[in-house]
Amino acid sequence: MKIQVDSDKCEGHNRCYSIAPDLFDVDDYGYATAAGDGVVPEGMEEKAQLAADNCPEYAITITQ
């Protein structure tokens, strides 16, 4: 599983980071990016899905 954050859609609410800080980074302006290469470690799949589901801008995409 892999996550991506669409930087054009992200408005910096940071719900994703609040839910799964191990999966997301936040830049100096408050915008989120996927941590590392975006690969979700085993056991973190539910957190990744929860973060995507809570993004008000639908900026997070999950691929298998």
Image (spheres, grey):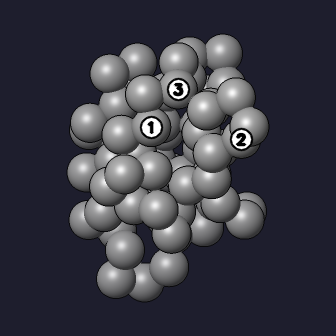
Q: Position of residue 27 (x, y in %)?
A: 71, 41
The amino acid beneath tag 2 is Asp
Looking at the image, residue 37 sits to the left or right of residue 23; the answer is right
The amino acid beneath tag 1 is Asn
- Residue at x 62%, y 32% (from the top left corner): 31
Which numbered circle lies on residue 36? none
Image vertical order of residue 10 relative to residue 19, above or below? above
Residue 48: tell me if it is visible.
no
Q: Position of residue 8 (x, y in %)?
A: 66, 15
The amino acid beneath tag 3 is Gly
Q: Quadrant of residue 54?
A: top left
For mark 3, give the secondary structure.
loop
Q: Position of residue 10 (x, y in %)?
A: 55, 23
- Residue at x 43%, y 84% (from the top left corner): 42
Cβ atoms at labels 3 and 1 below 8 Å apart: yes
Looking at the image, residue 38 sits to the left or right of residue 47; the answer is right
Q: CA distance from mark 2 to mark 1?
A: 11 Å
Q: Which residue is mark 3?
A: 12
